[in-house]
Image (cartoon, rainbow, N blue to C red):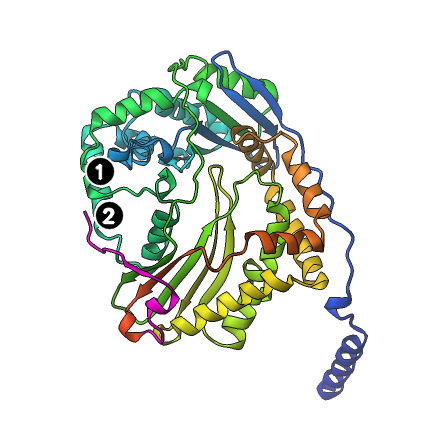
Amino acid sequence: MKKVILFGAFIMMLAVSASAVNPRDMTFSEIEFDAPEPERWVADNGMVIFFLEDHQLPVLIAHVVIRGGEVYDPEDKVGLASITASLIRSGGAGERTPEQVDADLDFVGAGISSSAADEGLTFDVRALRKDVDQVFSIFADMLIDPKFDSAKTALEISNRKDRILRQNDDPGSITRRVYYQTVFTGHPYGRYATLATTDKISRADIIAQHAKFYSPDNCILAISGDMSSDEAHALIDKYLGAWKSSGFKPEPVPQAIPQFKPGVYYAEKEMNQAHIRFGHLCMDDKNPDRYAMEIMNFVLGSGGFSSRLTKQVRTTAGLAYGVGSYNYLRPLMGTYFGYCVTRPDAMGQATKMMFDIIDEVKKNGITAEEMEIARDATINSFIFNYDTPAQVVISKAYMEYNGFPLDQMERALVNYKAATLEDCNRVAREYLDTENIVIIFTGNKELFDMQPEEFGPVTNVSMEIK
């Protein structure tokens, strides 16, 4: 009996298999994008607030972005914004010591984090609805009255210096750092904290940094969660309504312009790998060509195993552990780069193959089939970036913060859909470049199959930590 049942099941499987549709022939209805529109208002102290109700879970999520960031660090005190942001979270707040802040948040299972990016200072807050008052009280004290505990300040600065002393341990980090330092020569995007700049940062500098930049009229708050609009208004008035303006308005930082010297930059490190990164300045985050560029680059190098770089360099030739290309959009100028991690005895072969693939796309473009697949994947990925109320409300905050219209999400979707094969191939011709570029090789050149000099004039990068 058991054999009969198994045989019957096998016959049914064959029948289902024979009638199955090839996944490549399947069609799906277009995904609709209908994100909710947050409420927006401006508090009496100038703070901009975006709010969306979300009653799926008894949770409140808040995100704050403050105009400032690492691009405003004094050249001799690079690292100040980042250290200040960390200490706002770890250095005590209001009447609470650092230990009391941690204990109070742990007790209710809430989280608050703060950090500095290039163009902004950020906070993230997550709490259960029942604990919102306690958590927002701590959060408000961090924003308005951080204590910058002396012991925590000394520890943070010491930890930063330890991190700098270890900056050459990871070859990927070396390659990334040297690339940005080089391609953004003469611009704050190319600056990294050193032992010397960190040594010059004092507690007084940190207090002054907070007093200058952390101001309500320099701040956008995005909040979503299990409360009504009236409750959100009351919560913000109660805890942030007394926050006073510093009166300081950060001046815009100039855009980056090409000042780098094209050529090869070699970072010596004893290891059994070669790390490669090459590229150039490309476009900022408002360039109208960015939509076609993203679709084209999906085909070329960002589309994972479907991209030409991965298929040819990794899958077919077996020359890479990881390979791809990226169009990194930034407000003050972005960069387009290719990257690869490979065996040292395949460094030259992999680099030449990547150049050949990029030059082929620049010369002959991508195909209509590739473009359609890439555009669909890009649109689907874009839509799922706004899958929750928290994602939507935070995105709206950044639209305003970065100077985009508030319907930028809808406009972007229209522009992705409108991109044509001609657009994609035009941006490939205009923006792809394998000549006027910087090339970073990290590894032991004694093991390379080709010497760095074969790719252009070489600058040896000092690995000394200062």
Judged from the image, the secondary structure of the residue bearing numbered disc 2 is helix
Q: Is residue 403 above or below residue 373?
A: above
| Residue 465 part of the magenta segment | yes
Percent position of residue 245, x then y? 40, 14
- Which residue is nearer to you in this view: 48 or 125? 48
Decide whether the magenta segment is chiefly helix, strand or loop. Answer: loop
> Which of the numbered marks, if any, corresponds to residue 198?
1
- Which residue is nearer to you in this view: 134 or 39? 39
Percent position of residue 205, x then y? 24, 26
> Which of the numbered marks, if any, corresponds to residue 145?
none
Judged from the image, the secondary structure of the residue bearing numbered disc 1 is helix
| Residue 254 part of the magenta segment | no
Visible residue check, residue 147: no
Amino acid type for the residue under numbered disc 2: Ile
- Relative to residue 50, is residue 207 drawn left or right? left
Percent position of residue 21, x then y? 78, 70
Stretch of the chain drawn in magenta: 448-466
Visible residue check, residue 293: yes
Percent position of residue 99, x then y? 26, 32
Whole-number angstrom distance, CA of label 2 to CA of label 1: 9 Å
Residue at the spot x=67%, y=62% of the render? 370
Q: Quadrant of residue 442?
A: bottom left
- Relative to residue 41, is residue 17 drawn left or right? right
Q: Is residue 318 above or below residue 91?
A: below
In terms of sequence position, does the residue under pointer 2 or pointer 1 come before the other?
A: 2
- Which residue is nearer to you in this view: 353 or 109? 353
- Relative to residue 412, is residue 198 drawn left or right? left
Residue at the spot x=58%, y=40% of the render? 287
Which residue is disc 2 drawn over? 164
* Label 2: few (<14), some (14–19) or many (≥20) C-alpha neighbours in 10 Å: some
Please say if the residues under marks 2 and 1 sit with CB atoms less than 8 Å apart.
yes
Amino acid type for the residue under numbered disc 1: Thr
